[in-house]
Image (cartoon, helix red, strand yellow):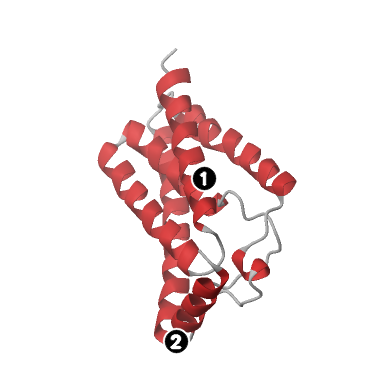
Amino acid sequence: MTEDRYKRLMEALGSKEVFVSLINAADRIITVAVFLGYVAGIIYLFFTGSALVLPMILIPAIPFVLVSVFRRLCDSKRPYEVYDTPPILKKDTRGKSFPSRHVFSIFIIGVSFYYLWPVVGTVILILGVIQAVIRVTGGVHFIRDVIAGALFGVISGLVGFYLILPI
């Protein structure tokens, strides 16, 4: 996206108070709902005595740490830093834009749930697509950030649950 196009988008969307409120609420609701669902899934597995409790924790956690370290090392600027335009989403973090950790997290959680409960996993993956769009239109990530986050999340989940775990 060019600087001019980005600034026009932020100006057009940011001038609509209803949109600003809606996109901030949707971002927060999706993030909290998926996190609480993830914790609930782990608790359920624990109380049912499932052997998948530890994989359900470690398979998302290890790549999450790796993505966090990678982001810190890359320290890519966010759109609002590059274009000096305030974001629509409430955010003031500097750098650490690539890849999107929100999108990474929701996609690896979606793949994790898909392994156990395909319908729930599918719903979470759909929410991941919505979250990716929100993070870009909210001005806190570039498209490349959310695509990389989604790919890292999906690949990490597939490797963990479908290649490593069955062994």
User: Residue at (49%, 56%) from the top-left corner?
Assistant: 143
Q: Quadrant of the C terminus?
A: top left
Q: Is residue 96 left or right of residue 18?
A: right
Q: Residues within 10 Å of mark 1 (few under 14, many from 20)?
A: some
93 or 58, which lies in front?
Answer: 93
Query: Mark 2: which secondary structure?
Result: helix
- Disc 2 designates what residue? 17
**Marking on residue 23:** none
Q: Is 36 rendered above or below residue 119?
A: below
- In space, the residues marked 1 and 2 are separated at their CA atoms by 30 Å
Farthest residue, direction left: 119
How many marks the image carries: the answer is 2
The percent coordinates of residue 41 (x first, y second) are 40, 41
Residue 156 visible in the displayed image: yes
Q: Is residue 52 left or right of residue 93?
A: left
User: Residue at (52%, 37%) from the top-left corner?
Assistant: 60
Residue 92 visible in the displayed image: no
43 or 143, which lies in front?
Answer: 143
Q: Is 56 rendered above or below residue 8?
A: above
Q: Is 126 rendered above or below residue 93?
A: above
- Disc 1 designates what residue? 148
Q: Is residue 15 left or right of residue 98?
A: left
Query: Mark 1: which secondary structure?
Result: helix
Q: Amino acid at mark 2?
A: Glu
Farthest residue, direction right: 73
User: Residue at (35%, 31%) from the top-left corner?
Assistant: 115
